[in-house]
Image (cartoon, coloured by chain):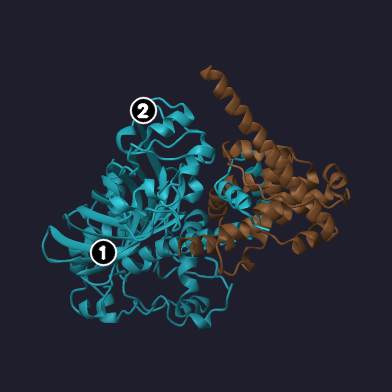
Chain colours: A cyan, B brown
Amino acid sequence: MQGEFEKKIQERMQTFGMPPSPQVWEEVNAVLGKRKHRRVFIGWWILLGLVVATGGILLYNKETVLRNGLELQPAINNDTAHTNNNSLAKKSAADTSLLNATAKQLTTSPSTPSQKNTGASQTISSIYNRTIKHTSKAVAATKQGNMPQAGSIVPGKNQSSLKNGEDITPQQVKEPPVIAETSSNLPLASAQQQLTRAPGDDQIKNDVQSGQQPSAPAGAQVTTQAQSPEKQTNTSPKTTILRRHEWFLRLSAGVMQTRQNSLLGSGDKSLAAATPQMNYANILALTAPAAIKYDIQSPGAGFALSASFVYQYKLSSQWQVYGSLGAVFLANTQKTGALYDQAFNLNNGLFSGGSNSNVQYTYYQGGEGNTNTVINKAWQLQAQAGVNYIINPRAKTKFFVDAGLSGAWMLSSRWLIPDARYGKLYYNKQVLNNTIIGWQAGTGMQFKNNIKLGIGYQQSFTSLAKSYVEPRLKWENVNIYTAVPFSLIASKKQKH
Amino acid sequence: MQEKDLIRECLNGDRGAQQLLYTRYADVMLGVCYRYTKSLADAEDILQEGFIKVYTKLHQFKHNGELGAWIRRIMVNTAITYINKHNRYKRELQVDDIAVHPVSDENPEITIDTKQLVELIRELPVSYQTVFNLVGIEGFSHVEVSKMLNINENTLRSQYNRARTMLISRLKKISNASENQAYAGRI
């Protein structure tokens, strides 16, 4: 039943449209939201679990910094352990910090094993108990009232002979023979030392308190253990600190721009070709002016700022791996057209097109009509992981190159996205990608105090907008950065 | 390819993709709904219901044809359901029109713009409006439409012919009026 009359009407109706009120989408959105609510709720729980797990791993790593990076080799032999007063004096500088800390805890020490001194013994016991749990030989010896041989107590060995939860009070231990582990609150430098202490150690304490070089009393042994067994010698024990773990605060600033795919700039794929006339006629009740070009104007260059915490693990003298978590701020400008101005009654430079979600059904007119400037802004939470290669590991100022991958999560944004295919312009975070994957590479130098200064380049693999929006906007930035080690910050604080 | 990406993201529950799909098609689809109703509010109700159906049945889209045509079909079906459900339309729809009207071969020039043409269609009685939309514009056969509206096929033919005749006469009237106005202007 299709006559000529019907065909004419059909042609007219193919292009007929009119903008619905915003409430329609809001209601559709609400219905969809109810369905998705449960999934989102489960998603939050998963996210919470990930955050807790990540926190746990970080805390665990922090503990490992103390233990792995600075702890001494547990293996020890008697030859190393027994030192004389001269060797003690030689390394007394290194021991002083430990002794200071120890002396603070050893406020009062019993001069004889039988002497009761509750305050001092409680302080000692807090240290002693931690040690004694790990030291079955000491347990056996103290339970029997015997003194263990100096150097025979090796933390971590023969732990199985002590039952879980079994504790030994100072009263049971007539003479605290060994303080093999200091309080965890002690400075890092102290933690690498283990003081083997025997009767008569008051002398050490007195020496420390009086600021003198501590001299070893009879039967006292100060044991220093090296991290690497091969570095341990029988005659001259050395303390080797391998700073495998390091935390940095990294700050960077640079210029950024968005890269578009080939849809932009090519004459045959201008917005005019992609934009049906009906859009103008029916949505904005305006006739698209034929004389004006409709090419989408490329966004201007902007800037990128970031601040992050970086964890670095040293694989070898030359290779390091790192991971970081931080915030990134991106901003640039984008020109919009006169038609856009006309539709929303915008004045030059005063873009206030409303919230992220209500600027829709808008059409872009470029070319001569560009009068408005929109400032795009985006906040991202960014995680990076990569590898550092130090070119000259033995030099004081080390040069390095690094490369890695990054993942960023959009926290908030106001970013104008032109969709050339449909001739629309979105200022709507819902068409923005929530997750942006990228890569980065750079080079720089690390000074003697471990401060890093470098230059980096970063580019996103994924588009800033969803993949179904054309053109695809990938961002890139060149930045200079500095990374300050936490250890340096901590040491400066201590000095103050 | 992009449309496939969009559909995939919509099926994954990506709200941004769902909104983009809505943004791309809502205006044209409201135009469709508007032709079937007497008020914009009713048209928006149909549009809303239609889009919810689109999202819930998107997995049934086979990519054989255009997504726009598929959505349009859903909107038309939703509009018919709406008309059959609401009394203000239903009462007028079920008026039997037994008299057979001869088919007009007239093919007048359409000098008015699309919006005016749509308004002319909307001014037809509900039954004529619906039948003309389905047969004349959407291109359904009489058999299909008679099943959709649950009316006799002869009645449908009669209604369609009357709708067509009525529309042509109104178009002529407007055309004549504008010619007279132009002629009067010259005098």
Which is nearer the eye, B52 or A363?
A: A363
Residue type at the position of mark 1: Ala
Residue type at the position of mark 2: Gly
Q: Position of residue A280 (x, y in %)?
A: 48, 39
A335 to A229, vertically: above or below = above
Please tell me whether mark 1 sits on a helix, a strand or a loop: strand
- Name the side, left or right, on which A426 lies relative to A256: right
Residue A244 visible somewhere in the drawing: no
Q: CA distance from mark 1 to mark 2?
A: 39 Å
Give the labeled residue for mark 2. A349
Mark 1: few/some/many CA within 10 Å (<14, 14-19, 20+): many
- Name the side, left or right, on which B115 lies relative to A107: right
- Residue at horizontal 37%, vertical 53%? A471
Q: Position of residue A185 (x, y in %)?
A: 41, 55
A17 to B184, vertically: above or below = below
Q: Residue furthest top?
A: B187
Q: Quadrant for the N terminus of chain A, please.
A: bottom right
A286 to A139, vertically: above or below = above
Give the labeled residue for mark 1. A403
- Residue at horizontal 58%, vertical 76%? A164
Q: Nearer the N terminus, badge 1 or badge 2?
A: 2
Question: What chain does badge 1 belong to?
Answer: A
Q: Quadrant of residue A303?
A: top left
